[in-house]
Image: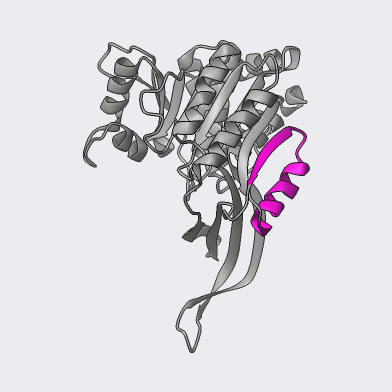
Amino acid sequence: MTQTNRHGLIRDMVRQLREHPARIAVLGDMILDNSIEGEPRGFHPETRVPVLGDATSQESVGGAANIAAALQRLGCEVTLFGIIGSDLPGRQLENLLDRQPFTSHLVTERGWPTPRKDWIYRRHEGRVEMIQRIDYDRPLPAKAREELVGEFRARCPEGVQVVILADHGLGCIGTETLAVIGLAKQRGAKLVAIPRTTVLRGQPVDAIVINAVEMRKLANASEQADPKLLATRYAREYNQHVFLTLFDEGVVVCPAGLREASGTLCEGYPIENPDWMGARDITTAIVALGLAQGRGLVDIGEISVVFRHLVAGQRGNGRVLWHDVYRFLGMDAAEAR
C-alpha cells in the first residue's frame, strides 16, 4: 500500500472517531512498569556487578492498562477491568490510573503481589539499549478471576462495541475468565484477544493479536515452524482473524476462514535500535478500534504498522497521539487537532 493510501485511512479513522467515539472495554493483566535508564560506570569494586550512574526512573501503566490508555488518547470511550494486589505497587498503579480520564474497575486481591516489571536501559554513545528486564509476579488465585467476571457483568457499560481480553501471561485470563466472552457477546460486542498463554486457544473471539513466539506456542508447533503458515492455519481452523506481528517486517493479516496459502503482509518501516515493548499492545488497540468502526482487516493492519513503528521508536510504552502519526506520515499535524 502506498503512503498516500495510508494518509486516507488515517484521515477517515480520525473523522469517524470525532463523529462517533468508539466504545471499548479492556479486561486483563495489570502491570506496573518501571523504566530505569543510566550511563555505564564500570563495575562495583567489591561485588563486580555493573554500575549505572546518572540514572533516572519512571513508572507507567502496562498490560491491559497500557492498552486502555492508548485508546483513550486516540479519542475512544474506554472502560478498564483488572486485578491488583493490596501492596505498594498496587496502590501506585491505582494512583496512576486515577490520573487517566477513563473509568477503571479494579479487583483487589489481598496477599497477592501486583505484577510489575523493571526495564533497565543504558545510555551509550548516543544510543539507549535495554540490558535487563526483571519480572515480579506470582500465580493468581482462581477466586480473583471469578470476582473480575462479576465486576464485568455488573459494570460493563451499555453500547460497548469491542471487548479486549489482554492475556499477558500473569494469571488474569484463566478458565474462570472465559465467561466474559459470553457476556460480551450478549451485549453485541466483538472480541479481540492477546493469547500469550493457551487459555484462549480456539475460544470464540473475533480476532487475536499475536507474535511469532506465541503463535508457535498456541499452535503447539516447533521453534522452527513458520509463524505465517501457522497463523493462516489457525485463522482457517478456528474461524478467527489473526494479526501476526513480526517486528519491523510488519503485520500479517489472516482473515477468519482464510483459504489462501498465506495472509497479507502490511509492511513496516525500517528503524534503528527499536524496542518493541508495547508494540503488540498498540496493535491490539488499533485492531479493536478498527473493528469498532467496521473497517477492512487489511486497512486495520496498514494503520497498525504506523503506530507500531512510533511505539518501537519510543522504547515501548510511549505516548502516540494523532498529531504524532500525522507528522510521521508527512501530513499536516494541524488536521489532527
Q: Is residue 197 left or right of residue 124?
A: left
Residue 320 belongs to the span the image colors magenta: no
Residue that appears at 70% across and 17% down: 17
Q: Position of residue 250 (x, y in %)?
A: 42, 31
Residue 102 belongs to the span the image colors magenta: yes
Residue that appears at 31% across and 22% down: 234
Q: Is residue 74 visible?
A: no
Residue that appears at 57% across and 70% down: 39
Q: Nearer the viewer, residue 284 or 301?
A: 284
Residue that appears at 44% across and 26% down: 208
Q: Is residue 13 left or right of residue 45?
A: right
Q: Position of residue 47 (x, y in %)?
A: 47, 85
Q: Nearer the viewer, residue 22 or 299?
A: 22
Q: Position of residue 273 (x, y in %)?
A: 47, 50
Q: Position of residue 38 (x, y in %)?
A: 59, 67
Q: How many marks?
A: 0
